[in-house]
Each structure stands twice: as structure tokens, then as C-alpha cells.
Image: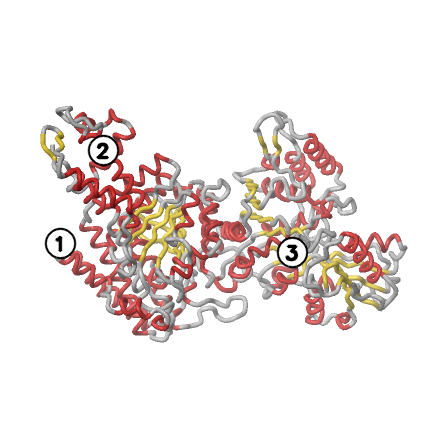
């Protein structure tokens, strides 16, 4: 019986793995060897050999990657691991004095063969880190799959595909370099194997019955990927590279640089078709990763099958190891509310970040080490071995398909140019680029390797290159006349959604619900299942909710929200809510889940309202804002008919997610014509609880408003909040909605609505006029927004000034409701004093924005409007409850005081 270690498979290693799991599953001869029994039974040499074989396998699986040949430049010294060296020494000592017998044949030097084969597998141009995986079965599977992949010879088709991918990438970059020598393109030169990896991942995904792949990318090699893998029309791509304006002008669609743009299309691999979407991304690259993950999750939800949509994320080494968002993203990977059945991560490891070397940019050995915290397997591969790269791509899809968990491919490569084609890398890394300048291009290397064994592959690649070059030339001649005849975006299914600007968003949208239906929904969502015994306070909560609905009065914010969710669910609209502690509610206001006191049973009564296949998700998120908000934004992109809501625990928690706001939420429609109806709930209000958790930073949001890009609303009544949520679905347009959400108003008895305000032809009121004031007697109008209205009203009414002072609330700060406000103010012809009152400091809140809007829309009161509020401060609020109460009282007194007295509160 000959040992098969020099053959074309990992038979020995696989057999040994089977033996360790179940001894009876291997043939008797092999079992005798593994058990360490010599045929004469007179020596323990075989036994020690078996133990040494086991130690070798485990050592190479754990540490082989440290000795692997991963750096194509050869500048990273290969480390010799002490344990492996000691085991090799033991083999040398034993092999000279021992002869093992197996199946009646003498097998001298078995362990030397084993070392040779393990070195070939684990310390060649590819390596694996999987010893940190806790699941033993999964850990064993991936090691054995890696062994098979590395020992499998490359078949002619694989060689041909690999050479074709490298050839097309090289042809594209050469063409663009010649035609556009002064343009940045962040070319793929030095990382051509990335095209091999992406093509092979998508091919394997299609063959594994995925219907769609959603990709989040980065600059490096993006144009080449779009052209040679995704199939973006070359005339469009070259026109964008040249700089042609394909936006038709206008501030509502600005466009973006070509290496940021996305594309959606269908590509074919033999008999398999695969829809592919590569999302646009901003320069802050890593933020696209959770956006695309959320988009993939939503598409899986629509498809009702995680195995139909693949999430593929492309990273660079510096960003993956340097950006904290990566840790947030990896933590989401196995959480039920965010899981996408495993993401394939491809890291294009340039071995430099702009000009920063790995030793300057990270403290870990590999850029991928952060992934170990969540048990993600890591496949390292030398980018100058594209066949090994293809093998790792195949293994990644096999792992994702079997275990539905994340996996990383660390593609170790280099940049032939600097950070971009206009940058000079030799300023800072002359030694590295001296090596790069003398390095033969990958295409030439691969041709030399393939020439002897697969000349037909070279012929096919040459034919493909010629045809592609001709196609590039035709596209180039069409640049000036090209105009896209359809949008190839990630939102092709949104064709019926209106792209509205300010005036379009300001149009009335009826969102009231039939009264009988609303009561029916209210009864359904207020009924605790009889098999549950909840906490007494929760029972009282649901009883009080039902009473307010059935009586039609006293409806608070939480009930109005539940009615909005429930009524949409009853209309077949799915709803998703996520955020830190959002299920119960940070302020114990929501109680969406009801828990049994004596068992682990839990129910969500609001789900009783669902009809026509609608679903309701309420998810307590991890302690993450940046990652989770970006994920929810991505989720909102998939389906305009789904309400997606993210709640910050406090409004200022949005600070941690500002990149997602700036780079995507407020700007994506202008840059990429990408719409979203995401709702962000930002609890806000100065209540004497200190500088933190007081402010949703209204002023920052308002500074980002232009051309109807977002909505910023500060609803002061439950009914208005109800309509605001429903309008997100019932409007013909979709806009991200920032809700300045209540805290203390959740329990303020005066802050209640009637059911009648939510039924019939009712709708959201962007301006709430003062219907109590006498139009002919009012001499002062106080404009305000949010909860300070209740302080003003209580004080005004207690002072008997109801006929003299009108309180007008601006419930939607942007788009600014100028016409509604003009109508509300026209009721008071004798007004001599105009005041804007807010509790926020003068340099914060809505004051400066509202004042500018009044000027812009030529309000007569603009020049006379005076400010009543706290003075400008570097923090949102003070830290003393006594001071807060005193200041709040002073603000109200000044706002309501004698004419012209209103001013800022001096402190």
C-alpha cells in the first residue's frame, strides 16, 4: 500500500482527520498505523511517529501561515516558527533510526513526506488562520477543505479564466493610462488578482444558486472591476473618466467622481445568471460596508431566502485595520437582527496606506487580525499567484454556503503606482518602489507559467484581449455623443417613486385612517396574549393604552407610534425598528415585547395587526451608532414600500454616526440619485440632565439641508408624529426623516391627542397655528418648535394672556413650510412684536436657520424677529437642575413679557 502524499489530493490528511473523529471509519491498516502499533509489537517507534504526525498537522494548521510566502515583493522576511523547527528536528533524529511498516511494506521517511506536503499546503503562496474558530466541526472542515484546495491541480478551464481576468484588467488599465494620462483612476496594477478573486467569487456564487450579489467596494481597481467584471457600459465609464457631465445640471443631482460610482446589471457564467449590484461609495470608504450589508439583508428579506443574495465587501488593508467601524460590522455578523448568512470580505492588501507603512498603521501582525475576535476564518494569499487566489475565492464561497458565516480573503499585493496615478510614492518609500519598478507585470508572469502546459489558454486570452481592445476604442469614439438611456443603479425598482425637491415635499399628503379600522388595529395591538403573565406595570400599560384608543382621547406619543406601525402593518406595509434598547424603549415608553414572568415566553402584540404578508421587526441593537445606522440606511434602499426606523438612545448619539449622515444619508440622492425613506428618531430636550443627552444637534442637521434632500421635523403632538411616520410610506416621494423625538413629553399629560386627529382626511401639520388666540386682540406672536411650547402655553394661560399672545409652532423645520406659516401669521393683523423662543442656546437649535428662512421668503416680520433663549454656549446645556429650572422660567418670562422685552437669558 503506497502512501499517497505525493499525489493530487489530501488523502492522508483527510483520512487522519476522519481517524481522530471516528477511529472505526478508517481502514484497519491505517488504523494500526495511527494507533502507533508496530507489526512486530517490539518497539514504540511507530507510536511516537504517529504522535509526531499529529503534532505536525496541528502545528502547520496553527502556525504554517507564519512561514508562508505571501509577499509578492519578497520584502517581508519569512518567519521560522520555533515549534515547527523543533518538530522538524525530531523527524530528522527519528528518520535515521526507524523504518515503519504499513500494509506489509516498509515506508522509510514517511514523516519527511508529511512535512514536505504540509509545507506545500500551509506555507506556500496561500495560508490559513482558523485555529481561533471555536466550533470544532467548522474548524476541522475548513482546514480539510483548504488542504484539498491547495493540493488540487489547476484544470485548463481555471487557468484560462485566471489568465483572461488578468489580461482584461491589464488591457483596461493600459488603455485608460494612455487615453487619460492626467486622470486619477486608482488602477488595479499590482493587484490584478483582485479581478480574478471577484470573478471567481461571483462565478461560484452563481453556481451555488445565488440569484444576486451585492458588492461594497473601494477605489482601488474599481474602474477595472466595473469594466471587466460587472459589465458597466464602456462608453458610459469612459465618458465619466473624461469628466463629461451626465447629470443634466442642477443642484439636486450633482454626480460624483467616476471611481465612486456604482452599477447594477446581470452577468452570466455559462448557464448561470447573476444579478450584480456594486453600490456607490464616498471617499470615506469603509462606511459603504455596513450600508451594503444592510442592503443585502433587506434583499434577502424580500427574497425570503438568505441563500439567494450574497454580500461581498471589498476593503483595503489600511482601512480594515485602522477604522473602528470594522469592529462594529464584524460584531453584527452573527446577530439575528443583522445577519446576512455570512459576508465574504476581500481585502486588497497594498501593504501601505497612502504613504503609511504597516508598522506605522497597525499594531497587529496582519491587517485582518481584528476579525479573529468574532471567529472569522482568514485566508491569506500571494497576489502574484492568481491560481491560488482563485482557489481561495472558491473556498470562501464554499464556507459561506455551508456555515453561513463571514470569511476573509487577505490578498497580499502591491501598488505599481502611488496612492493614485498623480502621486509620487518614491518620495517616502524609495526602497519599496525600487523593487516594484523592476517587477515583471503579473500578466507576463502568468503567461510564462501557462505557456508550457496550456498554450490554448494563451490563445484564448489573446483573442479576448483583441476583442476587448476594439470594444474600448469604439467606446472611446462615442464618448462625446454618449448619453445613458437607462439608469444602472441599485434602485432600478424605485422607478415609480418621485424625486421631489422642496416644494414637492411640502405638498399635502393625506395620512388619516378610517376610524373603525384604527380602533380595530388599536384593539389588536393592545391585547396581551392570554397565555402570558407579564409584569403588573406592563399589564397596566397595555390596559391604559386600550382605554385611550377605545375612548378616543388621551393618546400619548407611544400609543400614536404603535398605531402608526399597526395601521401600516394592516395595510400590508412591513416595518423594521432598531436601536439600543428600542424594544422596551429607553424611557420605558414602548414595551413592544411582552415577557412572561415565570417562563421565557415573549410576544409582540403589535404583530397581531399584520396583513398581506407584512412583517414587523423590532431589534435591540448592539451599542453601536455608526455601524447600525449605516446598516439601517442600507436596509432602507432595497424597498420603498417598507418603513425602516432607527432610534438613537439619545439624540446626541447621532454624533458617533455623523459620517454615515454626511456621506450617505443627506447626500446620496444628489450624488448618486439614490433615494431613502429612512426614519431617524433622535430624543431631544433640555431637562436639567446635563450637557450630554440633551441635544439632537438640530443646528447641525439644518446646516445640511438643501434642495429638499431630507426632512427635519420636531413634532409636538402624538397625532402629528403618527402622521409623520405614515407619510414616509404614503407620500409619492421618499426622503430621510430626522425626527426630533420627545423625552419628557412622553409622559406630559398635556401632550395628548384624540383619535379624531388621526382619522379621516387628517394629515401632518408642518405648522400648528394658535386656534385659541383672538386674532383681533393678539399683539405678540411667539414662534417656537418642540416641547417648549408646553411651557409657554402653561405660563401664558396662567397669566391670562391667551387673547394677547399667539403661540405658533413650526413642526417641520425643513423643508421650511413658508406658505403654511404665512397663512398662520396672517390671522393676526395687529401684531407689533415677533419673538422666536427656544430652550437651546442661541448658537444652537433652530433659531439661526428659521431667521434666515424668514428673510429668504421675505416675511415682513423677519427684520423685527427677536430671540428669547439661552446665550451662546459651547455645550448644549448646563449640569445643574436648579440652574436649568431657573433659566427655563426666565426664557418663558422674557418671551411672554411686555412688548420688546424678549431677549436672550443672561447667565
Judging by the rendered image, the residue that carries numbered circle 1 is 453
Distance between the alpha carbons at the discs numbered 3 and 2? 61 Å
Query: The N terminus lies in which quarter of the figure?
Result: top left
Q: Is residue 439 left or right of residue 476?
A: left
Q: Quadrant of residue 778?
A: bottom right
Secondary structure beneath label 3: loop
| Residue 576 against residue 163 in the figure, above or below | above
Distance between the alpha carbons at the discs numbered 2 and 1? 31 Å
Q: Residues within 10 Å of mark 1 (few under 14, many from 20)?
A: few
Secondary structure beneath label 1: loop
Front position among marks 2 and 1: 2
Closer-to-camera residue (498/396): 396
Judging by the rendered image, the residue that carries numbered circle 2 is 15
Q: Residues within 10 Å of mark 3 (few under 14, many from 20)?
A: many
| Residue 751 against residue 255 in the figure, above or below | above
Image location of residue 249, percent across then percent down: 50, 71
The structure's colour scheme is secondary structure
Closer-to-camera residue (471/352): 352
Image location of residue 737, percent across then percent down: 60, 55
Closer-to-camera residue (476/883): 883
Image location of residue 329, percent across then percent down: 47, 49
Q: Is residue 775 left or right of residue 73?
A: right
User: Residue 696 bears which disc, if any?
Assistant: 3
Amino acid at each position: 500500500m503506497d502512501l499517497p502524499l505525493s499525489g493530487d489530493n489530501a488523502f492522508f490528511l483527510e483520512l487522519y482527520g476522519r481517524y481522530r473523529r471516528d477511529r472505526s471509519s478508517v481502514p484497519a491498516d491505517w488504523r494500526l498505523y495511527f494507533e502507533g502499533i508496530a507489526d512486530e509489537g517490539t518497539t514504540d517507534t511507530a507510536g511516537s511517529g504517529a504522535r509526531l504526525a499529529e503534532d505536525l498537522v496541528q502545528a502547520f494548521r496553527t502556525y504554517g501561515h507564519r512561514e508562508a510566502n505571501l509577499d509578492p515583493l519578497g520584502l517581508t522576511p519569512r518567519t521560522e516558527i520555533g515549534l515547527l523547527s523543533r518538530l522538524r528536528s525530531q523527524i530528522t533524529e527519528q528518520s535515521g533510526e526507524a523504518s515503519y511498516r504499513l500494509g506489509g511494506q516498509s515506508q522509510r521517511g514517511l514523516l519527511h513526506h508529511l512535512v514536505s506536503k504540509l509545507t506545500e499546503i500551509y506555507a506556500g503562496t496561500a495560508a490559513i488562520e482558523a485555529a481561533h474558530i471555536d466550533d470544532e466541526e467548522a474548524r476541522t472542515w475548513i482546514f480539510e477543505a483548504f488542504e484539498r484546495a491547495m493540493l488540487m491541480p489547476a484544470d485548463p478551464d481555471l487557468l484560462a479564466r485566471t489568465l483572461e481576468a488578468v489580461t482584461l484588467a491589464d488591457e483596461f488599465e493600459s488603455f485608460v493610462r494612455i487615453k487619460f494620462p492626467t486622470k486619477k483612476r486608482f488602477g488595479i496594477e499590482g493587484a490584478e488578482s483582485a479581478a480574478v478573486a471577484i470573478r471567481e467569487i461571483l462565478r461560484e456564487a452563481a453556481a451555488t444558486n445565488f440569484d444576486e450579489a451585492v458588492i461594497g467596494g473601494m477605489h482601488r481597481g474599481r474602474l477595472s472591476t466595473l469594466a471587466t467584471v460587472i459589465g458597466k457600459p464602456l462608453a458610459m465609464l469612459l465618458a465619466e473618466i473624461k469628466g463629461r457631465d451626465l447629470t443634466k445640471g442642477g443642484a439636486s443631482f450633482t454626480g460624483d467622481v467616476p471611481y465612486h460610482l456604482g452599477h447594477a446589471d446581470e452577468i452570466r457564467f455559462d448557464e448561470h445568471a447573476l444579478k450584480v449590484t456594486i453600490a456607490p461609495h464616498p471617499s470615506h470608504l469603509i462606511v459603504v460596508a455596513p450600508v451594503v450589508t444592510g442592503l443585502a439583508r433587506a434583499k434577502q428579506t424580500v427574497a425570503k431566502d438568505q441563500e439567494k443574495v450574497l454580500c461581498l465587501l471589498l476593503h483595503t488593508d489600511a482601512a480594515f485595520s485602522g477604522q473602528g467601524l470594522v469592529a462594529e460590522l464584524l460584531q453584527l455578523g452573527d446577530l439575528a437582527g443583522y445577519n446576512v448568512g455570512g459576508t465574504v470580505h476581500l481585502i486588497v492588501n497594498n501593504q501601505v496606506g497612502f504613504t503609511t507603512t504597516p508598522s506605522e498603521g497597525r499594531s497587529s501582525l496582519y491587517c485582518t487580525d481584528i476579525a479573529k475576535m468574532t471567529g472569522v476564518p482568514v485566508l491569506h494569499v500571494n497576489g502574484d499567484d492568481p491560481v491560488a487566489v482563485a482557489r481561495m475565492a472558491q473556498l470562501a464561497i464554499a464556507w459561506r454556503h455551508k456555515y453561513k458565516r463571514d470569511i476573509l480573503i487577505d490578498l497580499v499585493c502591491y501598488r505599481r503606482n502611488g496612492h493614485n496615478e498623480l502621486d509620487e510614492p518614491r518620495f517616502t518609500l524609495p526602497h519599496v518602489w525600487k523593487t516594484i519598478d523592476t517587477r515583471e507585470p503579473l500578466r507576463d508572469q502568468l503567461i510564462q507559467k501557462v505557456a508550457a502546459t496550456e498554450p490554448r489558454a494563451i490563445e484564448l486570452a489573446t483573442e479576448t484581449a483583441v476583442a476587448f481592445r476594439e470594444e474600448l476604442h469604439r467606446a472611446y469614439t462615442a464618448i462625446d455623443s454618449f448619453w445613458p438611456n437607462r439608469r444602472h443603479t441599485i434602485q432600478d425598482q424605485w422607478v415609480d417613486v418621485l424625486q421631489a425637491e422642496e416644494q414637492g415635499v411640502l405638498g399635502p399628503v393625506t395620512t388619516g385612517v378610517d376610524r373603525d379600522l384604527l380602533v380595530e388595529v388599536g384593539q389588536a395591538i393592545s391585547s396581551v396574549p392570554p397565555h402570558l403573565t407579564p409584569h403588573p406595570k406592563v399589564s397596566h400599560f397595555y390596559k391604559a393604552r386600550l382605554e385611550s384608543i377605545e375612548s378616543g382621547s388621551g393618546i400619548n406619543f407611544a400609543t400614536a407610534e404603535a398605531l402608526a406601525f399597526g395601521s401600516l402593518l394592516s395595510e400590508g406595509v412591513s416595518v423594521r425598528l432598531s436601536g439600543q434598547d428600542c424594544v422596551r424603549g429607553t424611557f420605558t415608553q414602548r414595551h413592544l415585547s411582552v415577557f412572561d414572568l415565570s417562563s421565557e415566553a415573549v410576544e409582540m402584540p403589535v404583530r397581531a395587526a399584520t396583513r398581506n404578508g407584512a412583517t414587523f421587526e423590532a431589534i435591540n441593537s448592539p451599542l453601536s451608532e455608526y455601524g447600525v445606522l449605516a446598516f439601517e440606511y442600507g436596509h432602507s434602499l432595497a424597498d420603498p414600500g417598507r418603513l425602516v426606523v432607527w432610534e438613537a438612545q439619545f439624540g446626541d448619539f447621532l454624533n458617533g454616526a455623523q459620517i454615515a449622515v454626511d456621506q450617505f444619508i443627506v447626500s446620496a440622492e444628489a450624488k448618486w440619485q439614490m433615494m431613502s425613506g429612512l426614519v431617524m428618531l433622535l430624543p431631544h430636550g433640555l431637562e436639567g440632565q446635563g450637557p450630554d443627552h440633551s441635544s439632537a444637534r438640530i443646528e447641525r442637521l439644518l446646516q445640511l439641508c438643501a434642495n429638499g434632500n431630507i426632512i427635519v421635523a420636531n413634532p409636538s403632538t402624538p397625532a402629528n408624529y403618527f402622521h409623520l411616520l405614515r407619510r414616509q410610506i404614503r407620500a409619492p416621494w421618499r426622503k430621510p426623516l430626522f425626527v426630533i423625538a420627545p423625552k419628557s413629553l412622553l409622559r406630559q399629560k398635556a401632550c395628548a391627542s384624540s383619535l379624531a386627529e388621526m382619522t379621516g382626511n387628517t394629515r401632518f401639520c408642518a405648522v400648528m397655528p394658535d386656534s385659541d388666540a383672538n386674532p383681533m386682540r393678539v399683539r405678540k406672536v411667539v414662534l417656537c418648535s418642540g416641547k417648549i411650547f408646553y411651557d409657554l402655553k402653561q405660563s401664558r394661560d396662567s397669566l391670562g394672556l391667551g387673547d394677547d399672545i399667539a403661540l405658533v409652532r413650526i413642526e417641520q423645520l425643513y423643508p421650511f413650510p413658508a406658505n403654511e406659516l404665512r397663512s398662520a401669521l396672517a390671522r393676526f393683523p395687529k401684531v407689533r412684536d415677533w419673538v422666536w423662543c427656544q430652550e437651546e442656546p442661541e448658537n444652537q437649535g433652530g433659531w439661526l436657520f428659521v431667521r434666515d428662512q424668514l428673510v429668504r421668503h421675505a416675511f415682513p416680520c423677519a427684520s423685527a424677529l427677536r430671540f428669547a433663549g439661552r446665550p451662546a454656549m459651547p455645550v448644549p446645556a448646563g449640569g445643574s437642575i436648579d440652574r436649568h429650572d431657573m433659566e427655563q422660567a426666565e426664557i418663558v418670562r422674557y418671551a411672554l413679557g411686555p412688548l420688546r422685552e424678549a431677549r436672550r437669558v443672561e447667565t
